[in-house]
């Protein structure tokens, strides 16, 4: 119950913009899980993901990358990457890799997320379209404009099909 309480506290702190307090609460929760021997559980993976998101928000991309990597490893060992949560984790991980200019790492993570979405039949969704847009930008940066166009065309078609094209966000 203490871990859940700390996670709830962290959520509220995040809503209030208290990022340092949010990080402190999540770190305390992670320490409790470690003492209980539960760090390698899916709960531990979720906590690592939460830590990664806070570090990303704080601008510490390296630390975010570490937490996402640990979460990915835990989910992989538990055969839980082939889920919507796994696809979302891989997408976030790829985004951090892209911001760190690790294009190969970003593409590998995005490709793994795309594979999960295809297996689950969720590629034709808002999250799928967003992922395809991220892949397109990587392709564009790498000079593969034809591939970038193809990914953007698919993302646009998905958004049109689901009535999601008229949003203010670019992805």
Image (cartoon, rainbow, N blue to C red):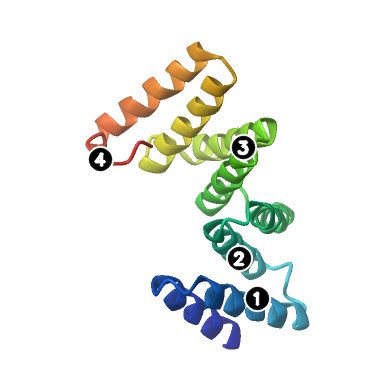
Residue 153 image point, x, y percent: 37, 20
For the residue labelled by badge 2, is the local secondary structure a helix, a strand or a loop? Answer: helix
For the residue labelled by badge 4, is the local secondary structure a helix, a strand or a loop? Answer: loop
Say whether marks 3 and 2 touch (CB < 8 Å). Answer: no
For the residue labelled by badge 3, is the local secondary structure a helix, a strand or a loop? Answer: helix
Q: Quadrant of residue 17?
A: bottom left
Position of 78 compared to 132: left or right? right
Residue 8 image point, x, y percent: 48, 79
Say whether marks 1 and 2 touch (CB < 8 Å). Answer: yes
Question: On screen, 9 above or below 89?
Answer: below
Position of 61 compared to 129: left or right? right
Query: Which numbered disc, 3 or 2, marks the residue that appears first in the sequence?
Result: 2
- Mark 3 Cα-neighbour bin, 10 Å: few <14, some 14–19, many ≥20: some
- Mark 1 Cα-neighbour bin, 10 Å: few <14, some 14–19, many ≥20: some
Q: Mark 1 highlights which residue?
A: 27
Query: Which numbered disc, 1 or 3, marks the residue that appears first in the sequence?
Result: 1
Say whether marks 2 and 4 touch (CB < 8 Å). Answer: no
Question: On screen, 116 above or below 142?
Answer: below
| Residue 122 visible in the shown view | no
Q: Between marks 1 and 3, how big is the CA–CA gap?
A: 28 Å
Q: Mark 3 highlights which residue?
A: 112
The residue sitting at 46% across, 31% down in the picture is 132
Front-most of residues 120 and 73: 73
For the residue labelled by badge 1, is the local secondary structure a helix, a strand or a loop? Answer: helix
Q: Quadrant of residue 150?
A: top left
Q: Mark 4 highlights which residue?
A: 167
């Amino acid at each position: 119950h203490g871990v859940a309480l700390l996670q709830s506290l962290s959520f509220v702190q995040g809503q209030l913009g208290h990022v340092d307090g949010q990080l402190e609460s999540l770190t305390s929760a992670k320490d409790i899980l470690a003492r209980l021997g539960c760090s390698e559980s899916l709960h531990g993976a979720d906590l690592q993901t939460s830590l990664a998101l806070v570090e990303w928000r704080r601008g510490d991309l390296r630390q975010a990358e570490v937490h996402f990597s640990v979460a990915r490893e835990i989910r992989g060992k538990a055969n839980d990457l082939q889920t919507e949560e796994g696809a979302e984790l891989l997408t976030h991980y790829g985004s951090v890799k892209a911001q760190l200019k690790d294009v190969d790492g970003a593409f590998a993570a995005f490709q793994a997320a795309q594979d999960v979405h295809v297996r689950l039949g969720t590629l034709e969704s808002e999250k799928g379209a967003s992922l395809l847009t991220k892949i397109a930008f990587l392709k564009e940066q790498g000079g593969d404009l034809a591939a970038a166009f193809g990914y953007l065309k698919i993302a646009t078609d998905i958004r049109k099909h689901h009535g999601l094209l008229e949003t203010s966000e670019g992805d």
